Image (tube, helix red, strand yellow):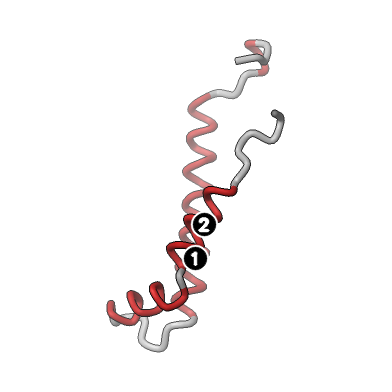
Amino acid sequence: MKRAPAKRYNETVVARQADKLWEELVENVYSNVRNSIKKPENRSSWTSKLEAEGVMEQLDDSIAEMDLNPEE
C-alpha cells in the first residue's frame, strides 16, 4: 500500500504467481520422493518414506522460513 498506485502489485497476478510457485514446489517434492521409493504405486511406501524422512516437517519449516516481503 506504500507504493504509488501504478506500481502496486496486482493481487490477481500475485495470486497466480503464488499458485505457480506452490505447484512447482509440490511437483519437485513429488518427483524427489517418488524417485527414492522402491514401489511408488504402493501407498504405504509413500507414507513410510514421508514419515521416515520427516518430509512434511521439513516442508513446514522451509515454508515458515520464506521471506515473502524482500523489500521491507
Q: What element carries label 1?
A: helix
Dot 2 crowding, Cα within 10 Å, few <14, some 14–19, many 20+: few
| For residue 1, above or below residue 15 | above
Q: Residue 25 carries which label?
A: 2
Residue most extreme to the right: 71
Q: Residue at x 28, y 80 (%)?
A: 44
Q: In the image, is 41 to the left or to the right of 14?
A: left
Label 2 residue SS = helix
Farthest-out residue, bottom: 38
At horizontal 40% and vertical 78% (from top left) the residue drawn is: 49
> Residue 43 occupies which quadrant of the picture?
bottom left
Left or right placement of residue 2 versus residue 57 in this view = right
Residue 68, label in figure: none
Residue appearing at x 47%, y 55% in the figure: 60
Q: Which amino acid does label 1 sit on?
A: Val
| Residue count near mark 1 (Cα–Cα under 10 Å), binned few <14, some 14–19, many ≥20 | few
Image side of residue 70 versus residue 26, left or right: right
Q: Where in the figure is residue 25, as x and y percent of width and height?
A: 52, 57
Circle on res. 29? 1
| Residue type, mark 2 in image | Leu
Q: In this view, does 67 lie above or below 27?
A: above
Quadrant in the picture for the C terminus:
top right
Can you give x and y, in whole percent of width and height, for residue 3 in the image?
67, 15
Q: Do the residues labelled 1 and 2 touch (CB within 8 Å)?
A: yes
Which image quarter: residue 34?
Answer: bottom left
Figure quadrant of the N terminus = top right
Extreme left residue here? 43
Q: Where is residue 46 in the image (x, y as percent from the top left)?
A: 35, 76
How far, Cα to Cα, is label 1 from label 2? 6 Å
